[in-house]
Image (cartoon, rainbow, N blue to C red):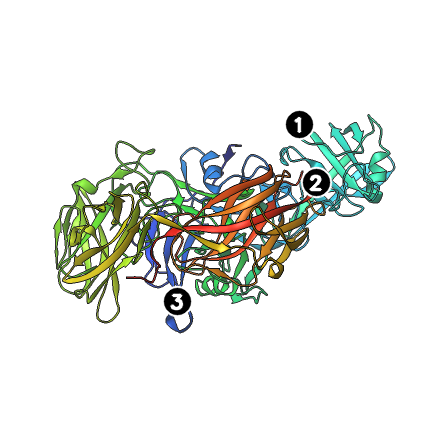
Amino acid sequence: MVAVLVAPLALLAPPPQVAADAVPPATGITGAVEERIATGVDLVSGPVPGPGGGGGRFASLLTVDLTEEIGIEYVDGGGLTSPATVADMAAAAEPPEGSTLVAAVNGGYFDIGATQAPMGAGMRDGRVLTSPEAGFAHAVVIDADGTGGVRRVAFDGTVSLPTGDLDLDALNAPTVPENGVGLYTSDWGEHPREHVVYEPGTGPGDTAAAPVAEAVISEGTVERVSDTPGRGPIDEHDQVLVARGSAAERIAALSEGDPVGLEHTLTAEGTDPRVVLGGRHVLVRDGEPVPVDDDSRAPRTAIGFSEDGGAMHVVAADGRNPATAGSTLAEVAELLAASGVTEALELDGGGSSTLLVREPGGARPVLRNRAGDRLREVPDGLVITAPEGSAQASGLWLRPALEPRPEHGSPTPPREDPRRVFTGMHRTLAATGHDEAFGPSGPGAPGTPDDRTDELRLSAPAGHGDGPRFVAGGPGRVTVTGQAGAVRGTVGLEVLPAPDALRATPGRLGLASSEDTASFVLTGVTEDGERAPVEPVDAEVGAVPDLVEVVAHDDGRFEVRPRAAKGTGILAVTAGGVSTEVPFSVGARTVSVAAFDDAQEWTARSARGEARARPVAGRDGPGLALAYDFTRHIRTRAAAAHPPGPLALDRQAFAFTVGVRGDGNGARLMLSLTDDHGVGHSLKGPAVDWEGWRDVRLEVPDGVGHPVTVSRVYLVEDDPGRAYAGEVVLDGLTAETATEPCSAG
């Protein structure tokens, strides 16, 4: 990783101290959780109403006052073709003395599956890093005066040769245009430069390829010329010209020692840019949403600015998880426009969508959005810094301890808003001390948060405290005050009437073996349909001791641990005078998903390649051959076999197994599922680097909603340096499932 010095944009005295929850609500987000992150940096997050007032979306909106002492800087993973997670980029950034990093967000679209380089423009501290590709002309721009906006950026450059000038078409870009020339510097990284010039299906020595040339320029003179682009790192004192077609002929004519002049600029509609981060669609212009021809739902990231450029708004919309499929670009545009932005730009979304924000009193930024998977490595992003405080405790961030939106991979299922609690029931609170700048306080600062939960003394107009637990009084809204030593904080809760029903999530548990475990959480529901989490302290579980034991955890879940190799039973759960039952099963059975006796009805589809499916003899019966050609492109290629109809299961699936006759080429086997929440999942199998028959097992991850439906089996190649064609044969797709259907019980 490359350490990045983050420079402050303005030097102003901090405003008077305010509480960590004293944040103006964001228009468009209902029941928002409001946090003061730092002076001039606020976060609101919560559900976004859907059509007719319905839910189904969740967004986090970070507002940054650029007139305060805030630093914003472009970061990458150590090179433009060396992607890293936003968390790793943030950890590598070095704020200036007296400042600390409080937030980070992913950048724009990139050449995924190939060079990994950004598609949009990039600039750090006034130095141009990369030029924009066609279709990515707009960018987030922070000007030298500290204000920001969405601008159309343009790259212009000249290569001065002994024979005359050439237009410089690109800088550290994923592709060099036909008959064009690109400049590559040490910022590029180590990715092979041949991938920026060759057409799909061609390469060095291919007679169909246009001429290619590369010249290494050192201190203004030619060091060497080659007809094959190089690979590996570029020395920081060198610059490399890579050219195609007619421009390559000019570069190839150079000789060692020839003088070469290089000039280039990145303009941003007449402003003086200091930081540039490229994006794609303009979502808001003149305060109004801009129509975009994309109605798909996915995790999203976008950045907008106020009319005077003094406020920056960063939005991250959740998606691809059990709670929400995601947001459309139109919905993100509407949210930003409602929040007061005049202009806004779409950044990369989907698995790239990442928003890290420090909690009040936190030592470092933590993930705030939920994009349905582990953090994706991306080429660039922005980090935000704010002044450090004194580390002397001046306030308390008080909030419910339960996490309603667990991170990917957590054993805890999602749950309702913990700021609601039923009358007479408990809500466990957590408390963190913070200083006057809302940063960490106490003896562990700045590296360790000041956890004051064990010291909490709670009070409220109705209800009472029991250590860190608040015992709710009568229905209505209540402000709970927490005191820890000399500091205090407050949190607002809504007390609901006693529940009319009790529900478990998930409603049925399947455990594959005695080594497996499963967890559930409880939700109470009032007569009017209002919901709130129920904590283990308020519940009683009637276990089946000869089959399972049930363990309550501080995160609010009940963990079920088998005591037998197989069996079925029911957990009786009671809380607040109402009850529910949680059926469970221990053990697994194998069911056939596809025997391929209908192989002639399966169809093949391909991305950036060719694919063909046909019936053949399998290992012990019918089989399906999937032929593919991955020689026609360097970017991620896939060949998929689709069944004639969805392959739906009726019970929880733990894993899938398919017989594969490999061809030894090394394409990766994948299986696509759609779960009961409508969320898609790709199960990752091994690279098929063997020949002959082998059984391949693909495990279903935690957090999938059951039952699932299989939509395709496919092969994928994401290494741009590998090109091949081949054929694999599939035989007998089966699933290892729970013994009981999901609808039973």
Which amino acid type is marked by label 2?
Answer: His
Crowding around mark 3 (Cα neighbors within 10 Å: few <14, some 14 to 19, many 20+) is some
Q: Residue 565's image quarter?
A: top left
Disc number lying in front (1 or 3): 3
As measured in the structure, the alpha-carbon distance from the residue carrying label 3 to the one carrying label 2 is: 45 Å
Q: Which residue in the structure is indicated by mark 3?
A: 49
What label does residue 235 carry, if any? 1
Residue 225, relative to residue 480: is it above or below?
A: above
Circle 1: residue type: Asp
In the image, taking residue 65 as reference, residue 406 lies left or right, namely: left
What secondary structure is marked by label 2? Answer: helix
Residue 129, numbered label: none
Give residue 28's position: percent from left, percent from top: 40, 65
Residue 427's place in the image compared with 720, above or below, is below
From this viewpoint, is residue 312 visible? Answer: no
Q: Which residue lies under the disc numbered 2?
A: 195
Q: Secondary structure at mark 1?
A: loop
Helix, strand or loop under label 3: loop
Q: Residues within 10 Å of mark 1 (few under 14, many from 20)?
A: few
Judge left or right: residue 157 versus residue 743.
right
Q: Are marks 2 and 1 in contact (CB under 8 Å)?
A: no
Kindly report the distance in space between the C-alpha atoms of the residues bearing marks 2 and 1: 19 Å
Residue 213: give x, y in percent of width and height: 80, 36
- Number of disc labels: 3
Residue sticking out furthest to the bottom: 52
x%, y% of residue 384? Answer: 45, 44
Residue 476 image offset from top left, x and y in percent: 18, 65
